Image (cartoon, rainbow, N blue to C red):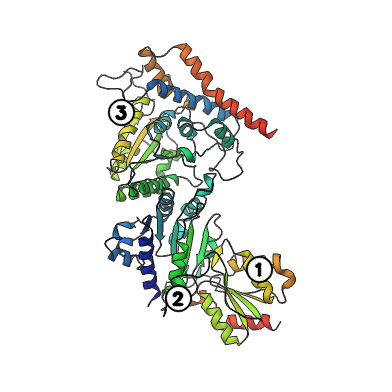
Amino acid sequence: MSVLTSLSEMMAQLLREDRRRVVLGEDARDGGMLGLSRTCIADGTLRERVIATPLSPTTAVAHAAGLARGGARPILVFASPLGLLEGLAGLREAARLGWRTGQSAAVPLLMVTPSGPGFGLGEEAAEAIEATLARVPGLRVLCAGQPAEAAAWLHAAAQLDDDDAVPTVLVLPRRVLLADTDEALPDLGRACTSAARIRDGQAATVFAWGETVQVALDAVAHAQIDAAVVDVGCLAPLDAATLVAEAKATGKIVIAHAGPAAGGLGAELAALFADQAILHLDAPITRVTGADAPLSAALEAQAVPTVARVAEAIAHVANY
Amino acid sequence: METTAWDPEGVTTVLDHSGRLSDQSRPPQVDIRAYYKALVGARRIDARLGELGLPMWASCAGEEAPLVATALVARPEDWIYPGSRDTAIAIARGMDWDELARQVLGRHTGGGPALPGRVCADALHVAPTTGALGMHLPLAAGHAQALRIAGRKAVAFASFGEGLTTTGVFAETLALATANDVPLVLVCRSQQWPGQAPAEAGVVGDSVADRARAAGVWSRRVDGADPLVVYATLAAAAERARDGRGPALVEAVVTQLVHEPPPHRDPVERLRRHLESTGAWTSTFQDVLDAEAVAHFDRALAAQRGARA
């Protein structure tokens, strides 16, 4: 099954599970440019809860936040992360809306966006939108890594029933979207706000998220070094306790992520480890990232570090 | 009735300059003395807020009618999204005096609306003001749509000034609200400038109501110095939105008192003249209102200041 199909089916399941949920987005009534509302549209009982939005990202985000304050459970789907970048004013407002009431009122809003290379688009595909999103106070930013977990990420991200639910963005890397998966896991098996070790190892620890999780797993195999891999998963707020504990466990750290190193979330992780695990570190914290410059469509794959570069970094810290 | 350069063109009125009902007008179904009392309260507290030296604060004197009328027209189940000069809405909606003083003095340590002097009264369905310009319009549209989806016969109001109509979110909200038949009432205050309007006003000789109509939104342009026509028009707009007939925009043309307009451009004075013409106003009544309006607020301010000492 393709990941896109698993997500489309999960979207319909979410609407069936809770009548307050609505799906919004440009072309959502036609199934959406990613096809994520296709199953909902095909089901006559769900179709009325799929709402098309005008081509205005700022308003779309604020409108969805208003829906959330009014008792609905909106899921706003973007065809491109540019929508969130264009809609940053609305996003900032949505993220602090509950706080502004003085009582941390719930704003159960979920936004879903693709990111990174994979569609042959270039340009924004190299930007690593999550670094921009993670700087918005009050926003929860999640990023799906392994293809089999993509639908489970969507399900987990949509669980916004707490009294203090915060607006959440689920980033779906395009490479993950285009993957096939033998079994789409129905459940994440952990809190979506937690970092998770997905490969055990003693010699080093690779921290990664999104499409780079698979790169990290392949790099460990390629390097033939017994390194652990941690899927950071929740990029804002960071699961600092788990991340620091994992960093201390081996003391040899590689951080691998898509997009530019400068101002990227790898720098935030490196600062966290320097602050809270410095006495446990046995090698320089090493970052492996995508290119710093805008990329043409032909070169967009350079937005994600290669298996060889990550393997080299693992060997470097393990043998330091 | 003599018109001057101060009198806006193309507006509906029910009160003439002397406060008398024009020939065919029937008064709206509102307790006019209570309405007047709320207008006086808004005016007096606006003056007090002006004395507090709050950063980035601006007076709403002269613009009270659409603010107070919105609070009076809204039912308890409705929601109001005010703009940044619209504290009068929460006051007229019955915000607790101590809470009001606490918020305008910036004593809250948790979250709060953007900018000191602005307030949020969530329990009274008065939403906090936003930081980014005009973002309360789409928020109100979404809230209104959620109320409709849930099958509640409730509406959301968003209050703003004409300068906002040059922003993208204004046009975007009109598109969104019409596309989804959202029960949203947009309450726009257009300033009447004694001379040439500045570029920031965004409205130079044309009407926001016309713009909204061109975008497919039911709209009316009324005289904001005539509190009765403002109330009646907002009530009609809310009624049709409540009935599922879609969004509405009411443009009230107001004159800020800072420009020192003639007295009939002052909505408080216009309604006072009306009450006087019907024998319902006396100087004693006025003295009581003036004293009452600020007494609660002053007491609450003093208590908050004492609490810090």
Q: Is residue A145 rendered to the left or right of residue B304?
A: left
Secondary structure of the residue carrying numbered label 2: helix
Camera-nearest residue between B172 and B186: B186
Instruction: Measuring from the top left, give residue A113's x and y in whole percent.
Output: 44, 64
Q: Within 10 Å of the Cα at label 1, are there few (<14), some (14-19), or many (20+) other Cα atoms?
A: many
Name the subunit of mark 3.
Answer: B
Camera-nearest residue between A228 and B210: A228
Q: Within 10 Å of the Cα at label 3, are there few (<14), some (14-19), or many (20+) other Cα atoms?
A: some
Quarter of the picture containing the C terminus of chain A is bottom right
- Residue position for label 3: B12
Camera-nearest residue between B214 and B119: B119
Q: Distance between the residues labelled 3 and 2?
A: 63 Å
Instruction: Measuring from the top left, give residue B33's x and y in whole percent.
Output: 40, 20
Q: Distance between the residues labelled 1 and 3?
A: 67 Å
Secondary structure of the residue carrying numbered label 1: helix
Residue type of the residue flagged with mark 2: Ala
Q: Quadrant of residue B276?
A: top left
How many callouts does the rendering have? Answer: 3
Q: Distance between the residues labelled 2 and 1?
A: 26 Å
Q: Is residue A54 rendered to the left or right of residue A137?
A: left
Q: Is residue A147 rendered to the left or right of residue B116?
A: left
